[in-house]
Image: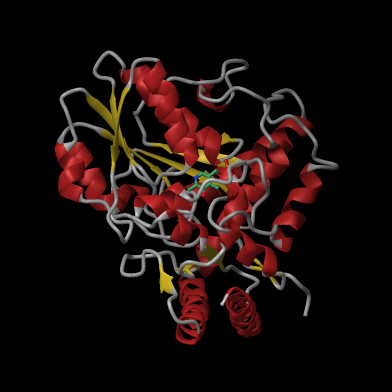
C-alpha cells in the first residue's frame, strides 16, 4: 500500500486517466485557437469546445447555450454575483447568502458591500442547516440575489436547491448556487431545481485544475467582469483553455455515467469509516450528523484534543481540518464555529473526504491509524 492514503477529495481530486487521454491531443497536434475562424486548426478546437459544452450541459440538465467556461468555481462565483449585481443594481442592492458559504462567495459579497451592496448572512443551526423561513423573511423589496451552496465543502451538508429557488422566485429574486462540491457527486438538474446560475470547478470531480463553468439560465443577462475579445458571448473574454475545457467535458461525461453507483459505494465506505472511529474513540462526534450530507464527506470532532498535533501525527492518511482554500489562516474553521463549536472543538475536528480511488482496505487502515494516533496522544497528555 502507498502512503499516505488520499482522503482529501473535497480539496481536489486526481485527474482521471481517461480525462488526461482526452486532453492530450489538444495540448499537442490540435493546438488551435477556438476563435480562429479561417483554418482547420481553429475549427478542430472549436469542435472540441462545442462537444465539451454539451457534456457539461448534459450533466446539469441544461442547454449548451447556457454554459460559460471560466477558470474555475472562484471565477464563476465572482462572475455570477458581481455580474448580477451590476446588471440589477438599479432594481436593488441587497444580496442574501449564508455564513458557512465558501470564501469565494463571502469575499465577493464583502467586496460588493464596499461598493454599496447590502449583504445578509443567514445563520445555520448546529447541524449546518438553514432556516428557510428565516431565509424568506430576509428578503426585502431591494433583494436581487440569493446565493446558497449546493453542498458545504467542510461538513458536506447539502441544501434544498429546489425549495430555495421557489422562495427566491416567489419574490422575483434570482438564485445562484455554488455547486462546486455537489457536481459530479450528486445528480443536478438546473431545470427541475429552478436554479438561475450555478458554479462548478473541474478539479473537484477528476478534471483538470484551472477550469470551470458558470451555468446562466437562458434569457438571463448579467454583466461581464472581464473585458476583451468577447469570447463566450461577451461574458468571459480570453482565449479558451481548450485542453482544460475538453477535460472538464470528459469529467462530466464520466460522472454522469457513474453517479448512481458511486453514491452507494462511497456512502458505504464513509459510513464504515465513521462507525469505526466513533465506536472506538469515546467523545468523538460527527459535525453536521443529522443533516442531509454528501455521500463522501465526514467531519469528525475528536473532542478537546490538540488539533494541530493530531493533524501532524496523522501520517498514513492525507486529511485536513476543513478548507484548503483557507489554508493561509490558522484560525479555527468559521464553518464549524457557525455550527456552535468552541475553538478547541473546531481545532480538534478533521474532515475526511473520500473519492473514486478510495477502497475498502483504505478505510480499515485509516480507522486503525486514527485510533492509534488518538490513543497515543491521550496517553501522553493523560
Ligand atoms: C473548491 C471550491 C471552490 C473554489 O474552487 P476553485 O477551483 O478553487 O476556484 C468554491 N466553492 C466551493 C464550495 C469549493 O469547494
Q: Nearer the viewer, residue 150 or 44?
A: 150
Give the residue drawn at x 56%, y 20%. Answer: 226
Q: Nearer the viewer, residue 341 or 187?
A: 341
Q: How many marks?
A: 0
187 vs 94: above or below: below
Where in the figure is residue 293, as x and y percent of width and height?
39, 65
Quadrant in the picture for the N terminus: bottom right
109 vs 316: above or below: above
Give the residue drawn at x 59%, y 68%. Answer: 355
Give the residue drawn at x 66%, y 35%. Answer: 46
Give the residue drawn at x 58%, y 53%. Answer: 204
Where in the figure is residue 307, as x and y percent of width and height?
56, 62
311 vs 200: above or below: below
Image quadrant where residue 239 sits: top right
Image quadrant where residue 294 sits: bottom left
Q: Quadrant of ligand 1?
A: top right
Say whether residue 20 is left or right of residue 53.
right
Quadrant in the picture for the C terminus: bottom right
Say whether residue 96 is left or right of residue 374.
left
Does residue 151 show up?
no
Where in the figure is residue 291, as x and y percent of width and height?
32, 65
Does residue 255 show up?
yes
Say whether residue 23 is left or right of residue 377.
right
Amino acid at each position: 500500500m502507498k502512503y499516505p492514503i488520499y482522503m482529501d477529495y473535497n480539496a481536489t481530486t486526481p485527474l482521471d486517466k481517461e480525462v488526461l487521454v482526452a486532453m492530450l491531443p489538444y495540448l499537442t497536434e490540435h493546438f488551435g485557437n477556438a476563435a480562429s475562424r479561417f483554418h482547420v486548426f481553429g475549427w478542430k478546437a472549436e469542435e472540441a469546445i462545442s462537444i465539451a459544452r454539451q457534456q457539461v450541459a448534459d450533466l446539469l440538465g441544461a442547454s449548451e447555450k447556457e454554459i460559460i467556461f471560466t477558470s474555475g468555481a472562484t471565477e464563476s462565483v465572482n462572475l455570477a454575483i458581481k455580474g448580477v449585481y451590476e446588471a440589477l443594481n438599479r432594481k436593488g442592492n441587497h444580496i442574501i447568502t449564508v455564513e458557512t458559504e465558501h470564501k469565494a462567495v463571502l469575499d465577493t459579497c464583502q467586496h460588493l458591500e464596499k461598493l454599496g451592496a447590502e449583504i445578509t448572512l443567514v445563520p445555520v443551526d448546529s447541524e449546518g442547516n438553514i432556516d428557510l423561513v428565516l431565509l424568506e423573511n430576509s428578503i426585502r423589496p431591494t433583494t436581487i440575489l440569493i446565493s446558497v451552496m449546493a453542498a458545504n465543502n467542510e461538513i458536506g451538508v447539502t441544501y434544498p436547491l429546489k425549495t430555495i429557488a421557489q422562495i427566491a422566485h416567489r419574490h422575483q429574486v434570482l438564485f445562484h448556487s455554488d455547486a462546486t462540491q455537489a457536481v459530479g457527486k450528486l445528480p443536478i438538474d438546473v431545470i427541475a431545481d429552478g436554479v438561475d446560475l450555478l458554479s462548478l470547478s473541474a478539479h473537484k470531480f477528476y478534471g483538470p485544475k484551472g477550469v470551470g463553468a458558470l451555468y446562466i439560465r437562458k434569457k438571463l443577462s448579467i454583466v461581464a467582469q472581464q473585458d476583451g475579445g468577447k469570447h463566450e458571448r461577451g461574458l468571459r473574454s480570453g482565449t479558451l483553455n481548450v485542453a482544460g475545457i475538453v477535460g472538464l467535458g470528459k469529467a462530466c461525461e464520466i460522472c454522469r455515467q457513474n453517479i448512481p453507483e458511486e453514491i452507494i459505494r462511497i456512502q458505504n465506505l464513509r459510513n464504515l469509516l465513521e462507525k469505526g472511529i466513533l465506536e472506538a474513540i469515546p467523545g468523538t462526534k460527527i459535525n453536521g450528523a443529522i443533516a442531509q450530507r454528501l455521500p463522501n464527506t465526514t467531519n469528525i470532532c475528536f473532542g478537546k484534543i490538540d488539533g494541530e498535533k493530531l493533524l501532524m501525527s496523522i501520517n498514513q492518511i492525507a486529511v485536513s481540518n476543513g478548507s484548503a482554500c483557507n489554508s493561509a489562516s490558522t484560525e479555527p474553521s468559521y464553518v464549524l464555529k457557525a455550527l456552535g463549536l468552541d475553538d478547541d472543538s473546531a481545532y480538534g475536528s478533521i474532515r475526511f473526504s473520500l473519492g473514486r480511488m478510495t477502497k475498502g482496505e483504505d478505510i480499515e487502515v485509516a480507522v486503525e491509524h486514527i485510533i492509534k494516533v488518538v490513543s497515543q496522544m491521550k496517553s501522553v497528555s493523560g
